[in-house]
Image (cartoon, grey):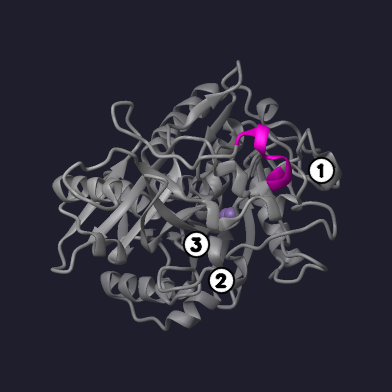
Amino acid sequence: MPKKKGPEAKHQSGWVILKDRDKQIEDFCRDYLTFMSRVKTEREAVAYIMGLSARGLIRIENRGKALALCRKGTRPLADGVRIVVAHLDSPRLDLKANPLYEDTELAMLKTHYYGGIKKYQWLARPLALHGVVVREDGSSVTITIGEEADEPCFTIEDLLPHLAGKVHAEKRVSEAFQGEKLNIIFGSRPDLEVKEEKVKAAVLKLLKSKYGMVEQDFVSADIEIVPSGAAREVGLDRSLIGAYGQDDRVCAWTAYAAVRDAKNPPYTTIALLVDKEEIGSEGNTGAKSIFLEEVLWQLAQSFKQQIIPSRVLYRSKAISGDVNGALDPDYPEVHEKTNAARMGYGVCVTKFTGSRGKAGSSEAHAEYMGWLRGVLNRRGIPWQTGELGKVDEGGGGTVAKFLAEYGMDVVDMGPALLSMHAPFELSSKVDVYSTYLAYRAFVEEP
Ligand code: MN
Ligand code: MN
């Protein structure tokens, strides 16, 4: 790896620091693009990674929505572990329990959005349906419709500008676009054999014949409406990656790859890929659950070591792998330029998150920041610091604080994105690769 001059070296563009590593960057990002094209939900992420070969990895799954990838360290578990946690869920639209109805001779599906979205970004664009339906008898069917060119897709219609004056243009954005109007267009051809709700009847017939589904099966389903289409290279120079769900599957992929490739890690290393971060890390697949303790119990059993999980966690070090917002060329006024992360400047280390006076942040200690900075500098890995917006401009949180509760040191580290939480988020290839290098350095560091 290219050496920086020393810890005092100024932050430089990742493209400068890694100028001899184009091939490695491209190779890594090719696999990442494939992952992002195939995977649109937490379930699909778990299934995809479980389907890859995993020499020397221990994989512990939680309800098909969360996953721990572990590599045994040379030291005993009792000395602590190294954890990189990332989340597999992304903002989206979920179907309601009774989604299907007919209006204006269109079959429609009602949704309830999940996580922080700008509602207008979901209108008038191709959408895909991904999910699983569990029937009353316990059998299930996995559904993906709307990704391939020969498949139909779905959409939410938007009001024509000619008539949008009072309803949209003259209102605040938060009032103009309402969650209850995010209804999916699901069909329009009537079933000529029935008398009422002919279009709804026709789509129900199709659901029955293609997926063995009856209307009540929607009650026991996890169906997510996501942007349709593959991840793409962006820019004439192909230097950027555009994809849905990079928050936070970019950190999930790089964390997985770091544990996969880690050479003789001194501490047992865990990529902990969790669900539900976008709605507060709740539930038995989220970061607030006891999944991590269960993972330690299973590792101890497999390694034949005696541990007390809480004491192992107290001695551990963690990275909260999550994205930050990059300095926006069109809206620089929301950032404070001295502390905003920049696209292409490597992995972003975020000492604290939160809002209104750091509320909700666990904030990393100076000692831990010093240690981590040394690790990154010694290995010549492009890195920068970041802060999500100006003071009092807004803010956000991550899973860091839930790990910190165990007593371990934890800091946020991941790439900065443009268009974060949009249906098409942008990352820089060199930042993605730097994130992988940084996570790998963290798990390999003595
Ligand atoms: Mn995130
Ligand atoms: Mn997010």
Q: Residue at x 74, y 48 (%)?
A: 385
Kind of residue sitting beneath label 3: Ile
Determine the residue located farthest toward the front in the rendered image: 195
Q: Earlier in the sequence, mark 2 or mark 3?
A: 3
Task: State the residue at coordinates (61%, 21%).
Answer: 235
Residue 408 screen position, x and y as percent: 58, 72
Q: Quadrant of residue 372?
A: bottom right
Note whether 304 is above or below 214 in the view shown: below
Q: Is mark 2 within 8 Å of ligand 1?
A: no
Q: Are marks 1 and 2 in contact (CB under 8 Å)?
A: no
Q: Which residue is mark 2?
A: 403
Amino acid identity at mark 1: Glu
| Mark closer to the chain start, 1 or 3 | 1
Q: Nearer the viewer, residue 90 or 255?
A: 90
Residue 299 horizontal side relative to residue 434, left or right: left
**Res. 8 mark:** 1
Check contact, mark 2 vs mark 3: CB within 8 A.
Answer: yes
What is the magenta range? 160-168
Q: How dense is the environment of label 3, judged by Cα within 10 Å: few (below 14), some, or many (20 and up)?
A: many
| Residue at mark 3 | 83
What's under tag 2, amino acid-wise?
Leu
> Mark 1 falls on what kind of element?
loop
- Helix, strand or loop for the magenta stretch, by majority: helix
Q: Is residue 446 visible?
A: no
Q: Quadrant of ligand 1?
A: bottom right
Q: Nearer the viewer, residue 37 or 212?
A: 212
Say if the magenta span includes residue 367: no
In the picture, the quarter occupied by the N terminus is top right
Any part of residue 91 in sight: yes
